[in-house]
Image (tube, rainbow, N blue to C red):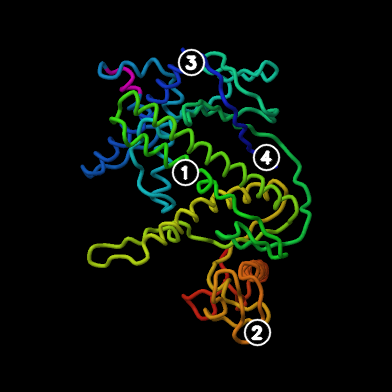
């Protein structure tokens, strides 16, 4: 199969290259924002949205305009890729996969992309990379780049510049090894497996909470946009980058371990956005237990469940294994012994005790068992086309005997 894989390294640019990269990132941001403003104006005037090809023609006019002649100083392809990102953002919005596109801000996810591999030269022996109008850039090579280079993305994070090299190569699909496993994601335990094992949470934000709070307090006492404020902001970004890097490293190691040992992984389709929604409420209907809910929201977002699911998805595909997602309803309230469903079965966060048959076990372990059974039921339903059996987490409220939907 064709494997698309990205290799990310830290760049070691000189002063002139840093200046140019900031300039190119600003150009890409300007083109995206101006294209979004143009699309909004046309929508308000009742006109049809411009296509990507039409936006590229408008970009040519901007580069030749007396108002923005500095756009000529940057490479054309990264600017066109900003318009392609805008077109993709609109497509995701109309497909209800994302919110409406928003204007980009300086200093937030600054990046630009080179899509033409003919303009890119990679010299792994000397640990350098050639990019148009930037020249040869040195990078910290931590591993070998495999495959044919397809595109390169340059980005900035916490004052440092990184390069992501996306490659394509042909690989043989291995035969999946290992048994099936269900996973129950949580806060007290990051991931509980149906075989009884579990992974303890990292809680990266909680570990660096004191350092982050002190850095943010120091930043709040500075005059905004002053030199001291910028230095304090850099210290805040450094702590936040340390938190994100630790979380990302933990998720990669956890997902790699699970993918190497299992041929089928079943997860709950958790709606993290709804689970971490604020409980503040409104003036007419104020929320309850706001402080407790705020702490729970921080703990949920600190786990990185969405990123964990994304990593499992592509890593299992690389190994010829499968990821199945099931609804989370009643997975923690269903007894795996007698099938009785009741909220009273789980009287505490950690303990499950069936009120019907007396079966008792760890609540997260019971949830993982029910998640695995729901995954088996979904697979059986998809293969046979029969009515879904009444397994935990597989009920649908829109019909009495609902069919399984892949």
Residue marked by disc 1: 210
Q: Earlier in the sequence, mark 2 or mark 4?
A: 4
* Alpha carbon separation for disc pair 3 and 2: 68 Å
Comparing labels 2 and 4, the label whose residue is closer to the camera? 2
Question: Is residue 64 located in the magenta-colored stretch of the structure?
Answer: yes
Q: Earlier in the sequence, mark 3 or mark 2?
A: 3
Sequence-wise first label, 3 or 1: 3
Q: Is residue 128 above or below residue 6?
A: above
Q: What span is colored magenta in the figure?
A: 60-65
Q: What residue is pinned by disc 4?
A: 2
**Residue position for label 2:** 358
- Which comes before the other along the chain, label 1 or label 2? 1
- The image quadrant of residue 194 is bottom right
Q: Is residue 394 visible?
A: no
Report the residue at 35% width, 19% height from top: 71
Q: Nearer the viewer, residue 175 or 252?
A: 252
Query: According to the image, label 3 marks what residue?
Result: 17
Where's the C terminus, which quadrant? Answer: bottom right
């Amino acid at each position: 199969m064709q494997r698309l894989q990205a290799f990310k390294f830290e760049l070691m640019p000189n002063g002139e290259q840093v200046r140019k990269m900031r300039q190119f990132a600003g150009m890409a941001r300007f083109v995206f924002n101006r294209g979004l403003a143009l699309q909004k104006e046309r929508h308000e005037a009742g006109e049809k949205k411009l296509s990507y090809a039409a936006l590229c023609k408008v970009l040519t006019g901007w580069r030749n305009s007396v108002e923005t002649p500095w756009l000529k100083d940057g490479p054309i392809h990264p600017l066109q890729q900003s318009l392609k990102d805008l077109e993709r953002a609109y497509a995701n919005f109309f497909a209800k996969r994302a919110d409406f596109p928003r204007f980009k801000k300086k200093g937030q996810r600054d990046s630009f992309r080179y899509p033409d591999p003919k303009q890119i030269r990679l010299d792994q022996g000397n640990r350098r990379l050639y990019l148009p109008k930037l020249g040869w850039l040195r990078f910290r090579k931590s591993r070998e780049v495999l495959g044919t280079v397809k595109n390169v993305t340059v980005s900035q994070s916490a004052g440092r510049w990184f390069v992501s090299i996306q490659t394509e190569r042909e690989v043989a699909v291995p035969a999946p090894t290992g048994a099936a496993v269900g996973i129950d994601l949580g806060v007290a335990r990051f991931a509980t497996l149906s075989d009884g094992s579990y992974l303890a949470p990292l809680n990266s934000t909680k570990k660096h909470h004191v350092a982050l709070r002190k850095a943010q307090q120091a930043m709040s006492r500075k005059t905004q946009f002053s030199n001291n404020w910028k230095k304090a902001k850099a210290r805040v970004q450094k702590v936040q980058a340390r938190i994100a890097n630790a979380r990302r490293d933990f998720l990669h190691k956890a997902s790699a371990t699970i993918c190497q040992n299992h041929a089928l992984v079943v997860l709950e389709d958790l709606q993290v956005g709804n689970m971490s929604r604020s409980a503040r409420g409104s003036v007419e209907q104020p929320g309850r237990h706001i402080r407790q809910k705020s702490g729970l929201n921080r703990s949920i977002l600190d786990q990185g469940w969405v990123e964990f699911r994304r990593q499992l998805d592509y890593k299992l595909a690389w190994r010829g294994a499968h990821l199945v997602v099931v609804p989370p309803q009643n997975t923690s309230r269903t007894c795996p012994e007698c099938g009785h469903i009741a909220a009273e079965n789980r009287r505490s966060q950690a303990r499950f005790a069936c009120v019907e048959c007396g079966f008792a076990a760890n609540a997260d372990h019971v949830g993982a068992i029910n998640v695995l059974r729901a995954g088996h039921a979904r697979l059986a339903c998809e293969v046979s086309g029969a009515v879904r059996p009444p397994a935990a987490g597989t009920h649908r409220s829109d019909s009495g005997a609902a069919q399984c939907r892949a």
